[in-house]
Image (tube, helix red, strand yellow):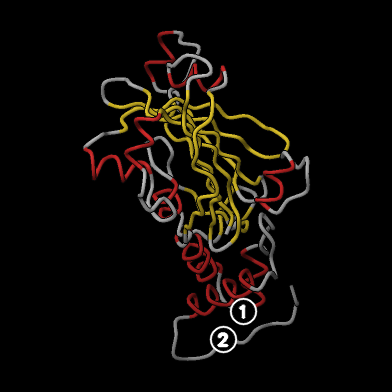
Amino acid sequence: MDETNIPLMGGRPRHEQISSWLKEQIERGGFAENDQLPSESRLGERFSVSRITVRRALQTLESEGLIYRRQGLGSFVQDTCVSHGLVRLTDFVEDMASAGISARSVVLHFKPEEATSRVASALAVDENTSVVRLDRLRYGDGEPLAFDYTWMTVFQAQLLDGKDLDNETIYSLLERDYNICICKSRFRIEAVNASNEIAQHLDVPWGRALLMIERTSFSENENPIYFQQRFYRCDRVAYELELVRGAEYKHTGSKGFPLREFEPVFKK
């Protein structure tokens, strides 16, 4: 950052001018993610204001989610990821909307095939039973973000035949048109390397590390509705979780902490 003193103009509170200037610097890339901002005293010298005024400016940026503060260390630039909760059961469009990202899907495949042992186990059918595989390329803000393989029984697939799967999700179609509620899902998260097919769809090099999320979704009566493998670009998504240790865990000797938040974090 240029060390030249910066004069403030009249007409607006000084702390607002300081927060606006810092925000502009962050948005222009003058400070990168997790960079430490100048100290309160240095900013006070730069703008010829008191530390109280600087502190008010920093509080504004913190409330807007642009910076975070560490006691005794200072203020740091928040990363540009937008997070949303995955403790709730949500679909891709809901996830993207919550993150402020424009979602779009393209159906690439929707045909029957024989169930592998993994698919058969997830859908509670016999191996080699005819199932239907749905492939979709998922876009976030116009860029390829994820690729899905989704398997379902022939009966479930018939419910989706002719539906607009480019713009609607399985969740919404089943609940709206057939009153079938997807009430439970079982997840598995794993790091994998991109196959040639998936690499081409996601516009990444072959063998690039991807985040694979397997999901088996169930209806209210515990019947499996579909089994899905979603491959996320690691440069666009990560996961954050928060564990809480309450007083009851201190006294009972429990070895585990309850999960409060488990969030995918998407980079715009």
> Residue 107, how many percent across, how many down?
50, 50
> Residue 53, how many percent across, how many down?
51, 71
* Residue 188 position (above or below residue 104): above
The structure residue drawn at horizontal position 46% and vertical position 54%, both measured from the top left corner, is 99
The amino acid pointed to by label 2 is: Leu
The structure residue drawn at horizontal position 42% and vertical position 15%, both measured from the top left corner, is 249
Q: Secondary structure at mark 1?
A: helix
> Residue 86, how many percent across, how many down?
43, 38
Disc 1/disc 2 C-alpha distance (Å): 7 Å
> Residue 34, how many percent across, how many down?
66, 54
Residue corresponding to mark 2: 8
Q: How many marks?
A: 2
Where, quadrant-wise, is the N terminus in this rendering? bottom right
The answer to whether the residues at label 1 and label 2 have Cβ atoms under 8 Å apart is yes
Question: Please, which residue is most extreme toward the right here?
Answer: 206
The amino acid pointed to by label 1 is: Phe
Dividing the picture into quadrants, the one containing residue 8 is bottom right
Front residue of 240/197: it is 197
Front residue of 108/200: it is 108
**Which tag, 1 or 2, sits closer to the chain's start?**
2
Where, quadrant-wise, is the C terminus in this rendering? bottom right
- Tell me, for residue 47, which label it has, or none: 1
Question: Please, which residue is most extreme toward the top here?
Answer: 253
The structure residue drawn at horizontal position 63% and vertical position 54%, both measured from the top left corner, is 74
As drawn, is 257 to the left or to the right of 116? left
Question: Please, which residue is most extreme toward the left here?
Answer: 179
Front residue of 91/76: it is 91
Circle 1 residues within 10 Å: few <14, some 14–19, many ≥20 = some
